[in-house]
Structure formats: structure tokens, C-alpha cells
Image: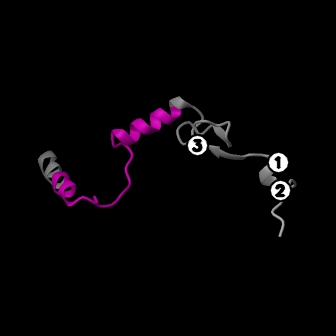
Amino acid sequence: MSHKKNIDSPLTTSPIKVNCPTCKKSVAWNEQSSFRPFCSKRCQQIDFGEWATESFSIPGSPADPELALNTAEEDQVQH
């Protein structure tokens, strides 16, 4: 069985394009795009900052029961 690449395949003729999650600029998904899926280091760092300050979060209960207690106590103090 031969494992030749199909050079006529659309995936080999043009790179996949994605939108930068931060600024929505089109980014080629290839090795030359060092910060993919981001268009630049700046956009990558903006996104990281959003996660670090908990502006972004994944819904659900914490996996660590101790953390769940601390969060519940913080909620009570704030209300």
C-alpha cells in the first residue's frame, strides 16, 4: 500500500485559515504562524491576561473541594 500525498488536495494547496480569538484577524494555520491561533504575541498575551484575571472561565464546579469551599465563602462575604 502506498502512502503518497495527494498534491491536488485543497489542504495542501492553501493553508487553513482561522480567526484570531482576540482581534478576529484571519490567520493561516501553518508553521510560519508562530502564535497560532493568534495573529501576534500581543493578541496571545491579551488572551492569557483574560484567563489569568479570571475574566474568562469554564463553567462548572471546581475539581478541588477545598477550592469550592473557599469560593463559597468568598461569595458570602461579597453579598
Residue depicted at x 64% and y 46%: 18
* Residue on which disc 3 sits: 37
* Residue on which disc 1 sits: 13
What amino acid is labelled 2 in the image?
Ser
Residue 17 pos. (x, y %) = 69, 45
Could you tell me if the residues under marks 2 and 1 are in contact, i.e. CB atoms within 8 Å? yes
Image quadrant in which the N terminus is located: bottom right
Say what secondary structure mark 1 lies in: helix
Please give left or right for residue 68 compared with residue 49 in the image.
left
Foreground residue, 20 or 4?
Answer: 4
Say what secondary structure mark 3 lies in: loop
Mark 3 or mark 1: whose residue is earlier in sequence: 1
Tell me the CA gap for discs 3 and 1: 20 Å
Say what secondary structure mark 2 lies in: loop
Q: Magenta part of the protein: which range?
A: 43-71
* Residue on which disc 2 sits: 9
Residue depicted at x 82% and y 57%: 5
- The furthest residue to the front: 1
What amino acid is labelled 1 in the image?
Thr
